[in-house]
Image: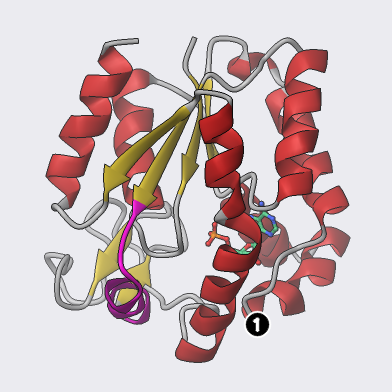
Amino acid sequence: MLNIILMGPPGAGKGTQAVKIEQEFSLPHISTGDMFRAEMASGSELGKTVKEIINRGDLVPDELTCEIVKARLSQPDCANGYMLDGFPRTLPQAEALEKMGKEINRPVTMVINVSCPDEELKRRITGRRVCPKCGASYHIIDMRPKKEGVCDLCGSELIQRKDDNLASFDTRLSNYYKSTAPLIAFYKERGLLFDFDGTIGSENVKNEIFALLRGK
Ligand code: AMP
């Protein structure tokens, strides 16, 4: 069963790989960041609660985050596998996920960890442009859309995420090292961790990940 976590610092390429994996293996792509952004766009109470936190690059409280993940993982489309992108990000979240995985009989079977040096992460994040409609990701130098400022896939106007600025990036990176990086040891201990070098080009990273997933 492919019950996967995609892990790595902001800008490592999780979102890019998630789209490729989703298409190839038909796994529901569960991105907590996308879920929160959808709540913010809809103006819901949850959206209003998390907006400030997210825009400054901080982490949403564990309890709130775990609640939306549990509801999502319990849905029928996750019975034959799922892919978590951006969750868990803290030790309490990883522990909660382990508990809920047992409860709903959908435990994590594999953790894909993509790494990348800090300077490269900063370059990627500050040059990133995204499609607010379909979530496709571009870069002003590395991955330009065919038509400037317009999404290749759905034709919407590209934007820069509010948290893709230098100050928020610094906060997100330090939160990553403080809260998320310790999860590498957590999953290594459980024999679930697989490491990938995020600097070898997205097609190469994809090929390596696909080879692992096909072997399972
Ligand atoms: P992402 O799209 O994964 O970069 O997430 C964007 C932002 O949403 C993060 O910087 C956090 O503020 C928030 N967020 C997403 N996932 C989580 C999580 N698992 N725990 C806490 N906050 C999260």
**Residue 141 part of the magenta-drawn span:** no
Q: Is residue 13 left or right of residue 78?
A: left
Q: Is residue 191 left or right of residue 20?
A: right
**Position of the C terminus by quadrant:** top left
Q: Kindly tell me whether mark 1's CB lies below 8 Å from ligand 1.
A: no
In this figure, what is the number of numbered marks? Answer: 1
**Ligand 1 lies in which image quarter?**
bottom right
Instruction: Say which of 195 and 101 sits in front.
Output: 195
Q: Secondary structure at mark 1?
A: loop
- Seen at 68% across and 73% down, the residue is 58
Instruction: Say which of 214 and 129 sits in front.
Output: 214
Quick one: label 1, few (<14), some, or many (20+) residues within 10 Å?
some
**Residue 31 showing in the rendered view:** no
Q: Main structural element of the magenta stretch: helix, strand or loop?
A: helix
Residue wearing tag 1: 56
- Residue 13: where, in percent of width, then height? 33, 54
Residue 101 against residue 32 in the figure, above or below:
above
- Seen at 66% across and 60% down, the residue is 179
Query: In the image as oriented, which residue stretches furthest toward the bottom?
Result: 167
- Residue 62: where, in percent of width, then height? 81, 53
Q: Is residue 6 left or right of residue 209?
A: right
Q: Is residue 84 left or right of residue 129?
A: right
Bounds of the magenta span?
115-126
Determine the image quadrant of residue 172. Answer: bottom right
- The figure's colour scheme reads secondary structure
- Residue 90: where, in percent of width, then height? 69, 52
- Seen at 66% across and 65% down, the residue is 41
- Which amino acid type corresponds to the residue marked 1 in the rendered image? Arg
Residue 136 against residue 99 in the figure, above or below:
below
Residue 165 against residue 68 in the figure, above or below:
below
- Residue 189: where, in percent of width, then height? 57, 30
**Residue 121 part of the magenta-drawn span:** yes
